Image (spheres, rainbow, N blue to C red):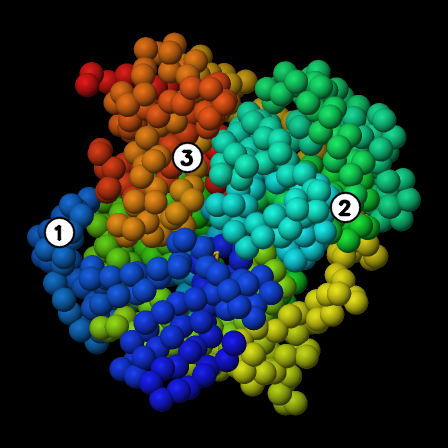
Amino acid sequence: MTAAVPSAQFRIVHTVCSHDCPDSCGVLVTVDGSGRAIKVAGDPAHPITQGFLCGKVAKYLHRVYAPDRILYPLKRKAGVAKGPLARGREREAFERIGWDEALDAIAARLQETADRYGSESILPYSYGGTISVLGYGSMDRRFFHRLGASQLDRTICAEAGAQAWNLVYGKKLGTPTEDYRLAKLILAWGANIHGNNVHLWPMVEKARRNGARLIVIDPYRTRTAAVADWHIPIRPGTDAALALGLMHVILNEGLEDRAYIAEMTHGIEELSARAREYTPQRVAACTGLTAGEIESLAREYATTRPAALRMNYGVQRSENGGTAARAIAMLPALTGAWKHRGGGGQLSTSGAFAWDKQAVERPDLALASPLGRLARVVNMSLLGQCLAEQGSGVRDQGSGPAVHALFVYNSNPAAVAPNQNAVRRGLLRPDLFTVVHELFFTDTTDYADYILPATTFLEHTDVQGAYGHYFVQLSQQAIEPPGEARSNVWLFGQLAQRMGFKEACFRDTHEEIVKQALAIGPDGHSSNPGMEHITFEDLKLQGHIPLGFHREPETQPFQPFTAGPLPTPSGKVEFYSEALASAGLDPLPAFVPNTESRLGKDAERFPLEFLGRKADNYMNSTFANLDGHRKMEARTSQRLEMHPLDAKARGIADGDPVRIWNDRGSLTLTALIKEGSGGSVPTGVVAASMDWAKLQPDGANVNALTSERLTDIGAGATFYSVLVEVAKLPA
Ligand code: SF4
């Protein structure tokens, strides 16, 4: 059942979970005769969703109908200072206003800001609070292009890995999720499949029932690592060294696939020379593994067929992370794993979805802005720097004015952006005008001048691809938005009209933009590559439709990177990158220790490597306000996980209050120490999970410790290159 099914009393509507997750589940919403959603369930007809939802979304109606949801536009009361507000008392700082008043006031202030400081002093800030096509970036992009606001470089999560993968393969494609069931070895590298890619897990289980082994490389003992056949607790930020060490062994022992390499790759001689430098002994010294483990892993990976790699984005969130992801991505090409169905690898499948972004985002509208050109680009991973001090300009972002207006949607930067204290100092600037479009009071709404009520994916129409499968899905509006909640599309269309933008595209409906994204032509079919068989009507009826190359998976399985030319400069898988060489960069992968690591210069003052990891039951900071989700996270919430040896050296016992700090900030947590093999971190590593800052004892979360240093490729955030020290606090 995928289409809307009317009955006398109930309707079942096909929607799509738009949270930032590779699985992009088909979600069937049952709506009663009064228009109220009474049930959400995974679509059993969807080949990946398979009828179940993760624990985060299974009780989604608690979120949709939460009593503390923001349902009306709010304006900060005169005289109430910005800054952290006690949970449950946020409303006292704001007064309810109507949409007309809110839109008029915001439009006027944006205009005034543009007139006074230049339009680039306005910065949109959004990310993956919703990843559907319209919700992620459509009317908002049109609006900000037309306004001449700064463009946002959305680097915070995945840019290093995305660029790294594309340097090797030219396109983000991977082994179909369904085919992991055929693997004989699954190598989960920084991938907590069981925790946050749960619809891959049934495939892993099927493969294991057929004799496959699951190997997990992760410094943290995740749920997935705990049930793996082999957990390899690598030191944070040393993944590039391990990948090069594996290459060394594979090439040294002649385990590479010479035929695949000859036909499909570029630069094997150069890569071989580089890999020779990474002996198992050298790699063991930096990764914390033994030379024997490195050799065993290389042999098992190279000689088991099919061998499927699942890399996830944690790997690339360190200074050397782009190179690490690039080196890991090369492994299936070195062993020819792509040739064997069920083998290969996946970081993301999003490159398969060729939406008509020009039509959806309308960058051409920038020509009609006061700038008459595309605006400068500001890196979201440097928000703290961007907001620093009135009139200081936007450092490291090229020329242009300081940021004087911040428009936040699909994100909670006061909780999720690196270097939290710098971000908060910026948000406190009295001259900064801040608007937040949100579902709940968050760490960021505490700094807002206006808060606007947003919709959930049940409350608007949208279209969506995925970064973990190959199905296009239509998300149909299931219920009316509660209160006066409004979608991103509605909000920015209305605001555009208030600002006097006359272009007709600002009046497009959700359905019209969906059709534009699909590039529906006069014959009713999409003209996007890979979507030519899709019509809007079929999508409405069926809910999900596979991309063209994935329509006959059994008789014509999709095996990427097995035939050229590839969309890389050489047309081949690139072990050696001329593009990097001509940019003056190392064209080959190399291990460079993170500045903040046990091999870095600050390790004497701050000897512990810190992982500010994501909670399994939240989506970054999303869901952390819901009591049910908090209960599921109770074991590690507000705890600092330490190895017993590190704890003992500091006189810390399980349950002791501890202070964890570096030069950027500090946190108070409770030590969680597990003796024996059940420990979650190796020596020299401590971990705490992401949460809302305002729900923590001292009003800060893990990002009080993270830095604004950027990744080597893609200028992304380096959440996992962080050094700290820990001490016991008096009880
Ligand atoms: S968060 Fe992921 S697994 Fe959970 S329902 Fe959404 S798409 Fe599915």
> Counting residues from the N terminus, which is met first, the one under dot 2 or under dot 3?
2
Image position, residue 604 (x, y; %): 44, 12
Looking at the image, which is closer to me, 517 or 688? 688
In 3D space, how far apart are the residues under numbered discs 3 and 1 (Cα atoms)?
A: 28 Å
Looking at the image, which is closer to me, 401 or 452? 452
> Counting residues from the N terminus, which is met first, the one under dot 3 or under dot 1?
1
Image position, residue 202 (x, y; %): 58, 52
Classify mark 2: helix, strand or loop. loop
> For the residue with label 3, is its CB less than 8 Å from the closest atom of ligand 1?
no
Q: Amino acid at mark 2?
A: Pro
Q: Is residue 136 visible?
A: no
Q: Residue at image x 38%, y 75%? A: 30
In 3D space, how far apart are the residues under numbered discs 1 and 2 (Cα atoms)?
A: 56 Å
- The residue beneath circle 3 is 612
Q: Residue at image x 60%, y 65%? A: 47
Q: Is residue 300 above or below residue 572?
A: above
Occupied quadrant, residue 630:
top left
Image position, residue 54 (x, y; %): 45, 55
- The residue beneath circle 2 is 306
In 3D space, how far apart are the residues under numbered discs 2 and 3 (Cα atoms)?
A: 34 Å
> Counting residues from the N terminus, which is met first, the one under dot 1 or under dot 2?
1
Q: Amino acid at mark 1?
A: Arg
- The residue beneath circle 1 is 89
Q: Amino acid at mark 3?
A: Gly
